[in-house]
Image (cartoon, helix red, strand yellow):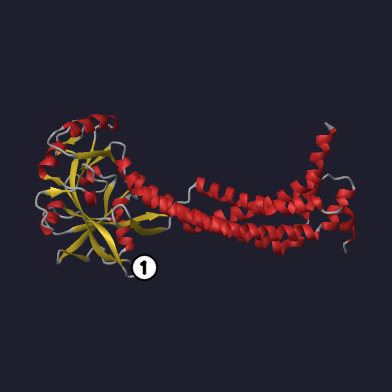
Amino acid sequence: MAGPFNWISQVASVSIFNVRTLPKRLGSSVTAVLGIAGVVAVMVAVLSIAQGIVRAMESSSAPENVIVLRGGATAEMMSGLGGDDVRFIAEAPGIARNEDGAIASAELFVIIDVKKQSTGTDANVPLRGVTRAAPVVHQDFEIVKGRMFEWGLNEVVVGVGANREFRGLSVGDSIEVAREQWPVVGLFEAAGGVSEAEIWVDAAVLQTAYRRGNSYQSVFAKLESPDDFQAFKDALTADPRLNVRPMREEDYYAEQSELLYNIVTGLGTLIAVIMGIGAVFGALNTMYTAVAARAREIATLRALGFHAGPVVISVLLESLLLALAGGVIGAGLAWLAFDGFTAATLNFASFSQITFAFYVSASLLVQGIVFAMVIGFFGGLFPAVRAARLPIADALREQ
């Protein structure tokens, strides 16, 4: 046991020595730490966009909620349902009911042009025609300013996300729809979900404005229990009068967010890898400088009987320590600067804007720190090997 204990003791001794001499290399060490911190901050910030989009989609769904589209449609924009279709869907088994009847909202989905607050450029904002069951079906709908629109009138209510990101959507403003001005009479929240990026109006009014007749694009419904979905789905798909695609609401929103999530995640990963390569070279330069500055000390330790292994590990530990510091700083800065930051982007599945809040999750922070440690490992590996291979006699002669 003396051998392993001695080896571990050597690792500890050399590592402590390296840490104590860090102030002598403060400039290069701080440069390496800040470089890694910058890489981690950018990576976490970009990936928090994808996390925020997924979170917004998840907040939009409830386990007992379903959406019904036309058969073969993958989004509301591609769907179409007639009035009779809506009636048959509302009569399907498993749908929850209250004193007003089936809790099912037949809805229209169109896009209007609105100016962005930040740039003044045009943006596609969803205008959703809803029926009276919509406030019950959609997750945590609540009017937070003004009032609900009057059914049958050309009035709209606006999600707080759309109000925040786009111009002319405050209470008292008016929007142009079908060459007419429709007043904004209220703002609503919806648990941070995608509905907060929408404008709502009475579906019957929207049908008239766009000459849609008695047609809709989707039906959102609430089931008595999530377990009723299969029976509900089987009843609709087996009905010869219907050609529809029933889905759990959570599955629908996951499908809607998949493309955007993959684009943002892929872009964030690519940026992180490119910047990470630069950070590795920065760490290499720092550790090579550290090894060169301590060549005589390392050679002295080797001459005193210290093995090459402890020297390699001690240099790697120093590099990992600097990387850990950079990772923690970068992750912390990303969390402070971006967590909860609100923005809007184009949802390619619906070709309309979606508002969301950046979400710097605990797992994302850990991912950033781990990435920093990977940079530190590769940045310290070759300098560590060089330190172990330094010729003792030549190093001792260096001034």
Left or right: 76 with respect to 116?
Answer: left
Q: Residue at x 80, y 50 (%)?
A: 388
- Which residue is at the front of the view, 113 or 187? 113
Left or right: 309 with respect to 207?
Answer: right
Is 111 drawn above or below residue 64 in the view shown? below
Task: Tell me if mark 1 has few (under 14), some (14-19) or many (20+) residues whose alpha carbon lies within 10 angstroms of its own.
Answer: few
Residue 119 percent coordinates (x, y): 35, 69
Residue 144 percent coordinates (x, y): 28, 54
For label 1, the residue is 118
* Secondary structure under the numbered disc 1 in the rendered image: loop
The answer, for residue 270, to whether it is visible in the render is: yes
Question: Residue most toward the bottom?
Answer: 120
The image quarter containing residue 220 is top left
Is 341 drawn above or below residue 56 in the view shown? below
Q: Residue at x 61, y 59 (%)?
A: 279
Left or right: 276 with respect to 219?
Answer: right
Residue 349 percent coordinates (x, y): 31, 52
> In which quadrant is the N terminus drawn?
top right
The image quarter containing residue 83 is top left
Residue 390 percent coordinates (x, y): 82, 54
Q: Residue at x 86, y 49 (%)?
A: 302
| Total marks in image | 1
- Which residue is at the front of the view, 2 or 265? 265
Q: Mark 1: which amino acid?
A: Ser
The answer, for residue 44, to whether it is visible in the render is: no
The image quarter containing residue 197 is bottom left
Q: Residue at x 34, y 56 (%)?
A: 355
- Which residue is at the front of the view, 20 or 305? 305
> In which quadrant is the C terminus drawn?
bottom right
